[in-house]
Image (cartoon, rainbow, N blue to C red):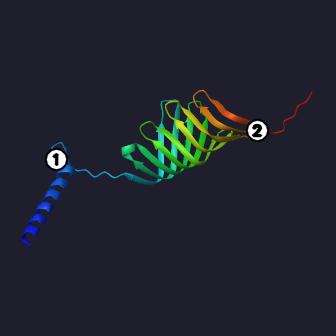
Amino acid sequence: MKRKGIILVFLIIVVTVFIVYHGLEKKDGEGVLKIISDKADLYVRDFHYTEVGDGESTWVIDADSAQYIRKKNLALLKNVKVKFFTSDGKTFFMTGKEGQLYTDSRNMDLRGNVQIISDSGDRFVTECINYSYSEKKVYTQNPVTLENSQLKITGVGLTIMLTTKTISLLSDVSAFINDFNISP
């Protein structure tokens, strides 16, 4: 019985030393307990973020909530609303049910009933859209619909270059033009 008690005390000491030795990290000569979780580092309700770009664009992101995962440089957003302002005064609004903002590259992905509406009334609808900050490009490989007061165009795949103001539908494109008349 006495031997079991000694072995138990010895095991407790070994486990304690192991935990202390592997759980402490030296920082400027001080011991700091390092606890890392795979879960979010920060949860925010009513998220608001404003980014002033390199003179070419500015964007404002609002979301019902955000979870920031520092280890992955990633913010997970719910019910996202993005407003882009281009240098020539154009405005684009993007919305989606979920979003991912990569804080290191400033790229963003939106999913779930994604809509992009320009200040001139053009409206794009798709299920998923990506934004490349460095290229100033909005793109998807999914089916997309473009509508305004004059036409409705559907296709698969979309690229919008914000700097050159070009829009490309990539495949399976069909169009319906309102009040289309062919006169001789």
104 to 44, vertically: above or below = above
Percent across and percent down for residue 11 are 14, 61
Instruction: Residue type at mark 2: give it.
Output: Leu
Q: Residue at x 66, y 41 (%)?
A: 144
What's the distance in space between the residues labelled 1 and 2, CA to CA? 67 Å
Q: Which residue is mark 2?
A: 151
Q: Which residue is mark 1?
A: 30
Percent across and percent down for residue 97 are 56, 51
Local packing at callout 1 (Cα closer than 10 Å; few below 14, some 14-19, many 20+) is few
Percent across and percent down for residue 86 are 57, 33
* Depth check, front residue: 165 or 96: 96
Percent across and percent down for residue 79 are 54, 52
Instruction: Residue type at mark 1: give it.
Output: Glu
142 to 9, vertically: above or below = above
* Depth check, front residue: 114 or 89: 114
Secondary structure of the residue carrying tag 2 is: strand
Whichever of callouts 1 and 2 sits on the residue coming sooner in the sequence is 1
Q: Is residue 35 left or right of residue 11?
A: right
Quadrant where the image shows the C terminus: top right
Q: Residue at x 46, y 37 (%)?
A: 106
Q: Residue furthest left?
A: 2
Quadrant where the image shows the N terminus: bottom left
- Residue 130's mark? none
Q: Is residue 139 left or right of residue 134?
A: right
Q: Residue at x 11, y 64 (%)?
A: 7
134 to 37, vertically: above or below = above
The picture quadrant where one finds residue 94 is top right
Secondary structure of the residue carrying tag 1 is: strand
